[in-house]
Image (tube, rainbow, N blue to C red):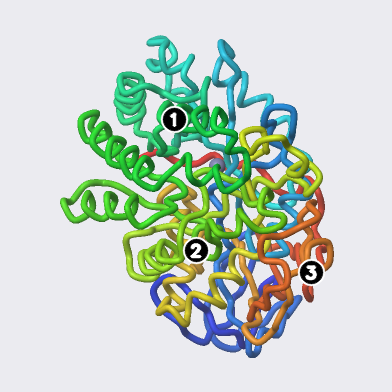
Amino acid sequence: MFDTVIRNGTVVTADEVFPADVGIVGERIAALGEALEGTTEIDARGCYVLPGGIDPHVHLQMPQGAFVSADDFASGTAAAALGGTTTVIDFVEPAPEEPLLAAFEKRRAQADGRVAVDYGLHMTIPAWHAGQPAVLNALDAVVAAGMPSFKLYMAYAGLHLDDVQLYRAMAAIAKAGGLPIVHCENGPLCDALRADALSHGETSPIHHAFTRPPRQEAEAVGRAIDVAALAGAPLYVVHISCAEALARVQDARAGGEDVYGETCPQYLFLNAQLLDQPGGERLICAPPLREPEDNEALWEGLSGGDVDVLSTDHCPFTAAEKAGHAAFTTIPGGVPSIEARLSLAHTFGQPRGMSLPRWVEVCCSNPARIFGLERKGRVIPGFDADLVVFDPERWVRIEAGQTLHERVDWSPYEGLHVQGWPRDVFSRGRAVVRDGAFVGQAGWGQFVARGGS
Ligand SMILES: [Zn+2]
């Protein structure tokens, strides 16, 4: 007798699709089989049973200049759960001179007791820290605290590393058994192009895209690949936005290099022309939106192999916070999508050749494997009972504040009809969503210490 049995569903893993009951004991998956019996039984007939989604790139209650992203750890993780995501990985962003582990404790204090599902943290190494040998020599302690992935920025004044800092940080991360995850844009070049645009009175949102062109992103991706190789480090490229940048990743992988690629829904669904339409300022994010051909190149990478992960880079700001700026340069950057990720990929991936196992691989299993979530991302006995009962026949019209629960009054996907939505969601054996309604509890989620390589 199991505590809970999810009966009659079709289990979808990164490898296969097969009918099975899933038995849960306590917080773990205990068995897969036929006619399992449980104290509680959930009928999943007609539904898929997936490992809980893992979104390894989110920014909850993140300060950005005078603004703070609109979802906090409670609202953001509840929305994640409703969308079938049972683990998120957010970021520690240390202030200049702040010890990395002190910043970690502060970030944990914001999340613990509030999160509805499990979470991890990446450690950012900002420019000040990257210049301190004592900081770089002590990364073992950060890995030991459960953060084997380190965010490095090649853009943004105050954050971005020059090539020497990038090299030294990557070498130190590799030595500690960690993974550098890198925002690849040529920051100084973009800053110059932005200043030029402003000096010509080019202030509207479309100039955000013109001043961060694809070639500079591709250049930064190529440079990150080369510097990582010189430093003996693996590399994870976050939010690839365009075909030119993806091509650099593909070349490196074809040459056998240890390079991972990530993209996000905004780079699959949206294009730069939208920046010129009413409300275009809402869609400012970096890298910027590109062209329809870039969308298709990234779909192909996601369906076919060279893009390993679909994350969201969820970083919501309200319509009012985005509006009314004299120039695009002061608009807070980032878009929401923490809740609709699985359904968007399910609906629009399959017509583009993405198989069900590949869908699970890029949304669940690859992020678990790449980021050291050792008991998540698979449906096998002994793993955490983070499970999604996904109804592939349920149609949902995306509406901010109605069908979505992100704490933001707009969605880039407003009005879009998606096929398939999570019906029931379990986090370590506990139901957090039942019949599409949130039944979880702030504080159920825990910080997950991840393993290094
Ligand atoms: Zn981000």
Q: Which structural element holds mark 1? A: helix
Which residue in the protein does label 1 denote? 187
Report the side of 55 relative to 438 (left or right): left
Q: Earlier in the sequence, mark 2 or mark 3?
A: 2
**One can see residue 301 in this view:** yes
**One can see residue 26 in this view:** no
* Ligand 1 neighbours mark 3 (CB distance < 8 Å): no
Q: Quadrant of the N terminus?
A: bottom right
Looking at the rendered structure, which numbered label has been put on residue 268? 2
Q: Earlier in the sequence, mark 2 or mark 1?
A: 1
Residue that appears at 55% across and 59% down: 273
Q: Amino acid at mark 2?
A: Leu
Give the x, y percent position of residue 180: 39, 35
Q: Nearer the viewer, residue 185 or 137?
A: 185
Q: Is residue 183 depicted above or below 15 in this figure?
A: above
Q: Amino acid at mark 1?
A: Gly
Q: Earlier in the sequence, mark 3 or mark 1?
A: 1
Asked if labels 1 and 2 touch by Cβ distance under 8 angstroms, the answer is no
Q: CA distance from mark 2 to mark 3?
A: 21 Å
Give the x, y percent position of residue 79: 74, 57
Q: Which structural element holds mark 3? A: loop
Residue that appears at 53% across and 56% down: 272
Q: CA distance from mark 2 to mark 1?
A: 23 Å
Which residue in the protein does label 3 denote? 403
